[in-house]
Image (cartoon, helix red, strand yellow):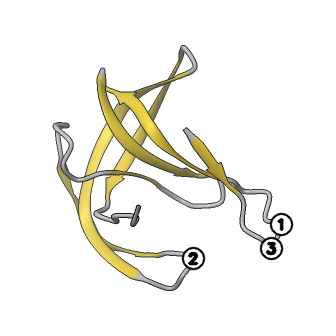
Amino acid sequence: MEAEEEESGDPHAVVTGMFPVNALSNKVLFDAGATHSFINPTTALTIEETEVQLCVTTPVGSLYQTDLIAQNCSITIQDRLFFADLVLLGIHRPI
């Protein structure tokens, strides 16, 4: 797991990492300042279409569109169980 804080001093950390989602290891992105959390679209979760197309803007200004969501996913972080609706978003970060 890694946390990133923007140079602007924004207290909303972006956390990415491999987490057990519905008991399967998946890459997830959480942003405390965002309205949604995101998951890699190659995951083997039950996927549903949203009623509207979501437009997601990244901090660098890139725009992504999606209408896919995995609802009520169980996520385990440090032995604590959480539930979240995760939007499928295909952003690949260069290594």
Q: Residue 2, image x and y in percent?
A: 59, 44
Q: Amino acid at mark 1?
A: Gly
Distance (Cα) linking label 1 and label 2 = 14 Å
Q: SS for tag 3?
A: loop
Give the residue at mark 3: 8
**Circle count:** 3
Q: Residue 22, image x and y in percent?
A: 30, 25
Labels 3 and 1 touching (C-beta < 8 A): yes
Distance (Cα) linking label 3 and label 1 = 4 Å
Q: Residue at x 41, y 36 (%)?
A: 18
Residue 17 sits above or below residue 53 on the image = above
Q: Residue at x 27, y 44 (%)?
A: 70
Give the residue at mark 1: 9
Q: Give residue 68's quadrant in the image.
A: bottom left
The residue lying toward the viewer, choosing from 4 and 48, is 4
Residue 66 sits above or below residue 68 on the image = below
Labels 3 and 2 touching (C-beta < 8 A): no
Distance (Cα) linking label 3 and label 2 = 12 Å
Q: Which mark is residue 75?
A: none
- Residue at the farthest front position: 95
Q: Amino acid at mark 3?
A: Ser
Q: Residue 75, image x and y in percent?
A: 43, 28
Q: Amino acid at mark 2?
A: Pro
Q: Residue at x 57, y 76 (%)?
A: 59
* Marked residue nearer the N-terminal end (3 or 2): 3
Give the residue at mark 2: 59
3 relative position to 80: left or right: right
Q: Give residue 46's quadrant in the image.
A: top left
Q: SS for tag 1?
A: loop
